[in-house]
Amino acid sequence: MSGTNTSQNSNRGSRGQGGGFRKGPGGQKRPGGFRRQGGFRRREEPKTDMLALWVPKTDLGRKVANGQVTNIDEVLLRGEKILEPEIIDKLLPELHDELLKLGTTQRTTDSGRKMKFRAVVVVGDGHGHVGIGSGKSDEARPAIENAVKTAKRNIILVPFGCGSWECGCGTKHSLPVEVTGKCGSVKVTLRPAPRGVGIVGNSIVKKVLAKAGLNDIWSTAKGHTSTKYNTAIAVYDALKRLSNMQSHRDWSEE
Ligand SMILES: [Zn+2]
């Protein structure tokens, strides 16, 4: 590939063609017809057919394909790397995805300018499984599909609990403890909230936590939270820390 990649950031003032998702200078309305925040629905893929064609490339993939491994939580608690999205398709068929951001970058080639799309997607089943991924492509749809695949490979198991001393109901509607995650300049802290509070936070925090299936959380976000990708990853990082603690604890107890 020849040419240079210009980042979305440095490019935001130029002509506004295609548009990104950021506000233009002076807070003007954002251009571009690719804004589809949330609620993005792909055509339902015939998952079973796709899985029938799957030729596993990893050891874990083969075990999942032939039915030796049927429980994703065992895999996740062991801390095994999931390299094939089909593993998730097979073991977590109830997964939903949501587009968090679709941005564009421009590349200058010999034949002119070329647009490249970058998508950030969250996947989750509402029962503690959640993943985030980003993907790039010359077209929007493949960028989103790549992001979904990456998000599936990044799936973690979030431990639920009732960590709020004001609540103490003991059901699994929140997180067991407070936790903080970071990405770039963004720092997100998630605190267990009493039942009925809901998810208190910005829209990205809400979307990621809702995909995980958490009901009641107080959150604070610091830094450049307008960078949706960093914000989403900071939330994911916080949940991943809890997830890692859980897998270590569970294995030492068994
Ligand atoms: Zn509670």
Image (tube, rainbow, N blue to C red):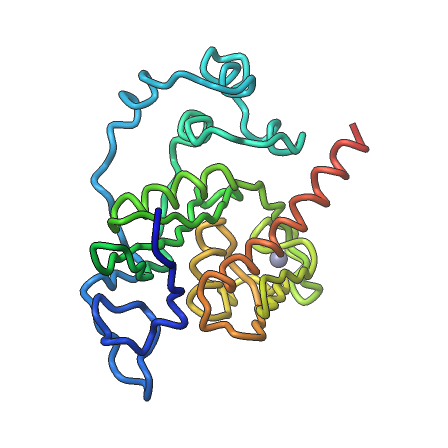
Position above or below: 192 against 56: below
Q: Residue at x 56, y 61 (%)?
A: 195
The spot of residue 213 in percent (x, y) is 48, 50
| Location of the C terminus (image quadrant) | top right
Ligand 1 is found in the corner quadrant, namely bottom right
**Closer-to-camera residue (22/61):** 22
The spot of residue 73 in percent (x, y) is 58, 31
**Closer-to-camera residue (102/97):** 102
The spot of residue 239 in percent (x, y) is 60, 52
Would residue 241 appear left or right of 129 to someone viewing this image?
right
Position above or below: 238 against 25: above
Furthest-left residue in this view: 33
Would residue 124 appear left or right of 156 to someone viewing this image?
left
Furthest-bottom residue in this view: 26
The spot of residue 172 in percent (x, y) is 59, 49
Q: Residue at x 77, y 39 (%)?
A: 249
Position above or below: 170 against 14: above
Q: Residue at x 40, y 38 (%)?
A: 149
Q: Residue at x 45, y 45 (%)?
A: 126
Instruction: Tell me how many marks there are.
Output: 0
Position above or below: 164 against 54: below
Q: Quadrant of residue 56?
A: top left
Furthest-right residue in this view: 252
